Image (spheres, helix red, strand yellow):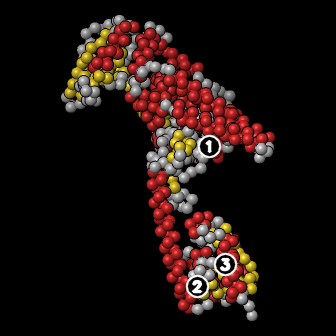
């Protein structure tokens, strides 16, 4: 009686590339073997493009096993043993099943027959060697992947904000601002859905935005320069600093903290300025928002859900008004002025923008050819063409902005000079003291919320009876980092404690300069305002072994406006002297301690 044979063929893409045999070639040889053995071919089972790592995910293989269990097949005929399995564990399961149902196994190229004990032993030895090889290949692949990832060859599909330069992943300047805006909007308290709605209303990139898309972007560490591999197989490995980041690590981490905050149960309304910012003075929880009902005048309150402590918002605003106005000054008169030039000088993305523009133009040409050759329909052509037109217009606008900045020849010293001159002009304005406080009152609730969300992480308060005090303001790391970056380039000023006529005060301090640069800077200031005075004083060692800047103010009609840390002739950062810029007393520019 003839045996019923099941012919099994399998090939993966890698197998065919490496060894060159196809399903057709295997099938032809196996049919010849069945003819030689006088087997009746019951069925042919083919798994194309599938690995032999396991048996569960091969549909044809599973159908063949079902026929074995139903006693429709007496013998399995395969080209080589590794076509069936490369796993010792799977081989034991397979041989056990075949023995249970009276089915044998033959391989054309390995001279295998499991109908004898020697044959089964030989099969096991071959499988051990095969599994060793596949594990060695896997190790070599992983080792090569690690090197590639560290070189910036990140194995990801098209990711918003990035582009390929040969194999390396680099920032796409035409899209990176969109990514930065998403993180900025989220940090200001906007939900994933709200951001998606904004982008859909503005038709950003001429595509449909979903809340899930925003979620993936916010949680993707690639935007801070890191990459995680192996997440799908449950063995994640973090590679840090493998690509140039679009946003800072501090901003990415703050957005993850914001995500955790948003998952908690907070009462939220649109009219709370300090939403998720006030820390309970007693139990240190974030205070929730609460407004009283009734017909009486309503006050905005923040209440702790745990200990029921409550604080009125208008009291907080009164206490924080000076800090808030300082933030407004930074936001509207410094950051927007210096940041574009700083970004341009650091990045200078003209070349990348032109490269991306040419790629899009080439795509547009190919799209038109596809339509003319009737490969695509008019609707598909119009949709893709509109998208490409939008992208081309966006990039042209960015190129125009870069060209305008290229023509802007101010150095950072020029910009600092301009800001100091504007300040000197403003001291003759009696309304200067209140200008930013007035600006705060003019802002909408949403604008106030955005300002606080952008710059402040949390506010610690002290409450005794009905009296509250501000214990500490914790600024966001992104704000501190950005401020430091602009300070180092002369964009903004910090404050330095000095001892003036035995009284401690804090005065604005510029970035360090050489004495030569400082003198040149003073000449430029005095050219516009000859009444400016300047002198230098050494940094002294106080009784507690700390350095302090100490000087006697001879002219009581003058006050310090700014101090300049002076570098030595070689530009080494050790500061031993300070230059003090003084102006006539019209408006107090220093803060008493």
Identify the image quadrant of residue 45.
bottom right
Give me the disc on residue 111: 2
Work out which quarter of the rendered image holds the N terminus and state it.
bottom right
- Eyeballing the image, is 227 above or below 561? below
Q: How many numbered discs, if any?
A: 3
Identify the image quadrant of residue 40.
bottom right
* Residue 152 located left or right of residue 95: left
Work out which quarter of the rendered image holds the C terminus and state it.
top left
* Residue 256 located left or right of residue 501: right
Residue 60 image position (x, y, % from top left): 70, 73
Of the numbered discs 1 and 2, the one sitting upstream in the chain is: 2
From the viewer's perspective, is the residue at label 2 or at label 3 nearer? 3
Q: For mark 1, does the 10 Å Cα neighbourhood hold few (<14), some (14 to 19), or many (20 or more) residues? A: many
Which residue is painted at 31% across and 10% down in the image?
A: 533
**Does dot 2 land on a helix, a strand or a loop?**
loop
Question: In the rendered image, is residue 325 in sight?
Answer: no
- Front residue of 31/59: it is 31
Q: For mark 3, does the 10 Å Cα neighbourhood hold few (<14), some (14 to 19), or many (20 or more) residues? A: some
Which residue matches tag 1?
Answer: 214
Distance, label 3 to label 1, CA atoms, is 54 Å
Which residue is painted at 30% across and 15% down in the image?
A: 519
Q: Residue furthest bottom?
A: 1
- Eyeballing the image, is 65 above or below 423? below
Which residue matches tag 3?
Answer: 29
Distance, label 1 to label 2, CA atoms, is 57 Å
């Amino acid at each position: 009686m003839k045996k019923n044979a099941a012919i099994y063929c399998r090939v993966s893409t890698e197998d065919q590339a490496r060894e060159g045999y196809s399903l057709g070639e295997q099938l032809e040889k196996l049919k010849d073997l069945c003819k030689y053995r006088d087997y009746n071919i019951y069925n042919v089972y083919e798994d194309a493009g599938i690995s032999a790592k396991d048996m569960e995910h091969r549909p044809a293989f599973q159908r063949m096993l079902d026929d074995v269990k139903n006693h429709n097949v007496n013998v399995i005929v395969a080209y080589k043993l590794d076509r069936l399995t490369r796993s010792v564990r799977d081989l034991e399961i397979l041989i056990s099943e075949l023995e249970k149902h009276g089915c044998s196994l033959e391989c054309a190229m390995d001279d295998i027959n499991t109908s004898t004990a020697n044959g089964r032993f030989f099969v096991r030895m071959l499988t051990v060697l095969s599994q060793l090889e596949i594990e060695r290949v896997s190790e070599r692949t992983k080792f090569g992947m690690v090197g590639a990832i560290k070189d910036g060859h990140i194995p990801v599909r098209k990711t918003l904000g990035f582009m390929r330069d040969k194999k390396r992943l680099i920032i796409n300047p035409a899209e990176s601002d969109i990514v930065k805006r998403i993180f900025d909007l989220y940090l200001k308290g906007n939900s994933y859905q709200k951001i998606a709605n904004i982008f859909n209303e503005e038709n950003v990139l001429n595509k449909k935005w979903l809340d899930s898309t925003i979620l993936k972007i916010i949680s993707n560490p690639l935007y801070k320069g890191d990459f995680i591999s192996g997440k799908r197989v449950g063995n994640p490995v973090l590679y840090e600093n493998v690509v140039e980041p679009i946003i800072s690590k501090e901003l990415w981490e703050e957005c993850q903290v914001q995500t955790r905050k948003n998952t908690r149960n907070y009462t939220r309304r649109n009219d709370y300025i300090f939403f998720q910012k006030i820390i309970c003075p007693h139990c240190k929880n974030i205070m929730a928002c609460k407004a009283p009902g009734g017909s009486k005048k309503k006050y905005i309150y923040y209440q702790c859900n745990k200990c029921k402590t409550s604080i009125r918002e208008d009291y907080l605003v009164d206490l924080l008004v000076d800090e808030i106005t300082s933030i407004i000054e930074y936001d509207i008169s410094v950051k927007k002025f210096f940041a574009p030039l700083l970004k341009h000088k650091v990045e200078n993305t003209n070349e990348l923008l032109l490269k991306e523009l040419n790629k899009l133009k080439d795509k547009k040409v190919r799209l038109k050819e596809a339509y003319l050759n009737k490969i695509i329909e008019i609707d598909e052509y119009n949709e893709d063409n509109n998208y490409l037109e939008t992208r081309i217009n966006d990039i042209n606008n960015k190129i125009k902005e870069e060209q305008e900045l290229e023509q802007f020849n101010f150095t950072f010293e020029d910009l600092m000079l301009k800001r100091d001159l504007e300040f000197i002009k403003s001291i003759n304005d009696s309304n200067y003291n209140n200008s930013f406080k007035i600006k705060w009152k003019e802002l909408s609730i949403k604008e106030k919320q955005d300002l606080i969300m952008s710059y402040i992480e949390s506010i610690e308060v002290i409450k005794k009876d009905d009296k509250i005090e501000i214990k500490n303001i914790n600024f966001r790391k992104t704000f501190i980092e950005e401020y430091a970056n602009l300070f180092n380039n002369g964009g903004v000023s910090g404050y330095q404690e000095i001892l003036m006529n035995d009284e401690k005060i804090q005065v604005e301090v510029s970035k360090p300069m050489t004495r030569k640069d400082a003198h040149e800077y003073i000449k430029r200031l005095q050219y516009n305002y000859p009444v400016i005075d300047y002198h230098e004083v050494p940094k002294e060692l106080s009784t507690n072994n700390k350095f302090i800047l100490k000087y006697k103010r001879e002219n009581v009609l003058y006050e310090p406006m700014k101090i300049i840390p002076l570098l030595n002739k070689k530009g080494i950062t050790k500061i031993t002297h300070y230059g003090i810029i003084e102006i006539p007393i019209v408006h107090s520019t220093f803060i008493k301690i």
